[in-house]
Image: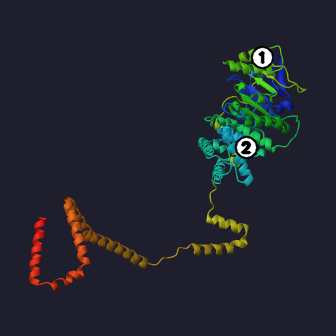
């Protein structure tokens, strides 16, 4: 039996064999829900159940420290004591919790990435593609690689715009540090024993990290065998801030969680959802929770009143007005309804909850780290210790000590290695110098030829063109001159024979007269 508290002078307890019907602990901040979670978890651990508690705020991690005597516990069946506890975290703060993406599944990852139904369908195609083709899908880096491959191969059903959105959200998750929740080595169930606490107080910038226990729930659902009804749970999961899992969730996630809750009870697993506002959990989830421990509920809207009324009517009939009592409960007092020895729902009643047997204060990190198993810290740490390399003398000594007959062969191989690794001497670079000189000489000659060509040809042509451009008529004269030269070139033979057929004196007078006329016309 798990002792919860007292009602009048009677101790209210929960039969352990009915805890696999799951439970709910709800209440506003400061009402006592975290302490009740602590009370149930520590008793389960004392009775041999493997317990996993998610601690979002970091104020329920004192399991390893003995608590103080409390007057409220006069009728409790336990006394203050500490419990051996392993503390986990997503960062390297404590033991690093990590899951394989393939084992986590696309539905829960979609919720953590806040994908819409279209993007979620793309992600499910990626998981199916990786499984079909035997591709590794352990970390977010693997997921990005598979997405790129599917786009490159133009796989049917893949939209580039949706893939781009998914990749941006994955990169944002990696940037926030939450991406380290996925990868190798993934959590092995044989390392999940005794009391375990997932401290998420350093990852609260993105509250969706609080759904991390859902990946453990999925792992247990996939790996554990069927055991039927059990006298006490083999595993118990306490899901803190559970409303973040279901807030704005789609039907596929709700269906998955309902399926898990229905079937995992036959695997000996108990699940407790811990939340501030019970109205944030879907009705189909509330219908799977047999034990209800409800603290004060603060309701300020008509919609909230309707949901609270629905919760109140889910309890069996009793003499108290459950809805009105839920609004006025004192801290540490809850309305409790559980299962009796015959498995029937008990009437709701006000119960003053016991105080935990372990510490209720916030414990410093060094104490929590010291309480954790160092083997698990080393096993799941991403920062593996770097071993100092042995010296050559130590290696040689070790070889001789283990196998003396290898001494000669070792020395021979060492000598051969030294000869092989000995740098070769290079001769003087004579030809290299000659080749370099010839290249420089060729470069000098090309520069000289370029300057001569520019001075003799390019510059005169440039000056002449500027001369013509000053007066457009000069361009006409130049064109006429070119025409005359071309005509003379074509008729050069005729011109050469022409002087022989004329009197020289008469021809000279004719030329002089023509030259004078042309000169006067040009002026």
CA distance separating discs 2 and 1: 39 Å
Question: Along the line of sight, which residue is nearer the eye, 492 or 219?
Answer: 492
* Residue 477, disc: none
Q: Position of residue 386 (x, y in %)?
A: 63, 54
In the rendered view of the protein, which quadrant contains the N terminus?
top right
* 391 over 22 or under it: above or below: below
* 480 over 191 or under it: above or below: below
Q: Position of residue 198 (x, y in %)?
A: 70, 37
Q: Is residue 370 visible?
A: no
Q: Is residue 39 left or right of residue 118?
A: right
Question: Along the line of sight, which residue is nearer the eye, 32 or 293?
Answer: 293
* 411 over 104 or under it: above or below: below
Q: Residue furthest right?
A: 342
Q: Which residue is mark 2?
A: 105
Q: Which residue is mark 1?
A: 322
- Residue that appears at 67% across and 72% down: 410
- Residue that appears at 25% across and 77% down: 489
Q: Earlier in the sequence, mark 2 or mark 1?
A: 2
Q: Position of residue 482 (x, y in %)?
A: 24, 70
Q: Residue furthest bottom?
A: 500
How many callouts does the rendering have? Answer: 2
In the rendered view of the protein, which quadrant contains the C terminus?
bottom left
The 10 Å Cα crowd at callout 2, few under 14, some 14 to 19, many 20 or more, is: some
Instruction: Name the image colouring.
Output: rainbow
Q: Secondary structure at mark 2?
A: loop
Q: Is residue 10 left or right of residue 463?
A: right
The 10 Å Cα crowd at callout 1, few under 14, some 14 to 19, many 20 or more, is: many
Q: Secondary structure at mark 1?
A: helix
Mark 2 vs mark 1, foreground winner is: 2
């Amino acid at each position: 039996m798990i002792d919860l508290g007292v009602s009048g002078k009677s101790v209210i307890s929960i039969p352990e064999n009915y805890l696999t019907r799951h439970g709910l602990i709800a209440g506003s901040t400061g009402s006592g829900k975290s302490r009740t979670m602590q009370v149930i978890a520590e008793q389960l651990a004392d009775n041999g159940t493997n317990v996993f508690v998610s601690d979002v705020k970091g104020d329920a991690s004192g399991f390893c420290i003995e608590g103080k005597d409390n007057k409220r516990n006069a009728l409790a069946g336990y006394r203050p004591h500490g419990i051996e506890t392993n503390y986990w975290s997503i960062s390297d703060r404590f033991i690093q919790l990590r899951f394989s993406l393939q084992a986590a599944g696309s539905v829960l990852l979609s919720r953590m990435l806040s994908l819409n139904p279209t993007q979620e369908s793309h992600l499910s195609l990626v998981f199916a593609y990786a499984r079909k083709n035997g591709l590794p899908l352990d970390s977010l880096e693997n997921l990005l690689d598979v997405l790129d491959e599917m786009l490159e191969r133009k796989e049917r059903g893949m939209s580039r715009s949706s893939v781009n959105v998914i990749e941006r959200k994955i990169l944002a998750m990696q940037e926030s540090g939450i991406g380290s929740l996925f990868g190798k080595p993934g959590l092995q169930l044989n390392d999940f024993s005794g009391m375990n606490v997932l401290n998420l107080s350093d990852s609260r910038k993105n509250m969706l990290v609080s759904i991390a226990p859902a990946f453990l729930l999925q792992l247990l659902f996939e790996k554990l065998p069927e055991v039927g009804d059990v006298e006490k749970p083999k595993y118990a999961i306490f899901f803190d801030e559970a409303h973040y899992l279901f807030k704005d969730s789609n039907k596929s996630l709700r269906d998955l969680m309902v399926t898990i809750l229905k079937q995992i009870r036959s695997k000996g697993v108990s699940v407790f959802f811990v939340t501030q506002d019970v109205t944030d959990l879907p009705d189909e989830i509330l219908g799977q929770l047999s034990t209800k421990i409800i603290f004060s509920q603060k309701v300020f809207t008509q919609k909230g009143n309707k949901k609270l009324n629905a919760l109140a009517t889910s309890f069996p009939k009793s003499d108290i007005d459950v809805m009105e009592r839920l609004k006025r409960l004192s801290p540490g007092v809850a309305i409790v309804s559980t299962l009796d020895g015959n498995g029937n729902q008990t009437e709701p009643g006000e119960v003053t909850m016991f105080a935990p047997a372990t510490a209720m204060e916030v414990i410093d990190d060094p104490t929590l780290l010291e309480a954790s198993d160092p083997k698990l810290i080393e096993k799941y740490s991403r920062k593996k210790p770097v071993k100092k390399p042995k010296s050559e003398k130590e290696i040689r000594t070790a070889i001789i000590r283990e196998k003396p007959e290898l001494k000669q062969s070792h020395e021979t191989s060492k000598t051969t290695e030294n000869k092989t690794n000995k740098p070769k001497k290079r001769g003087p670079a004579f030809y290299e110098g000659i080749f370099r000189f010839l290249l420089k000489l060729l470069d000098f000659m090309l520069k000289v030829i370029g300057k001569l060509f520019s001075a003799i040809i390019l510059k005169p042509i440039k000056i002449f063109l500027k001369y013509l451009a000053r007066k457009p008529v000069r361009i006409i004269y130049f064109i006429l001159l070119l025409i005359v030269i071309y005509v003379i070139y074509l008729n050069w033979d005729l011109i050469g024979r022409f002087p022989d057929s004329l009197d020289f004196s008469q021809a000279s007078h004719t030329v002089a007269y023509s030259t004078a006329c042309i000169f006067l016309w040009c002026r």
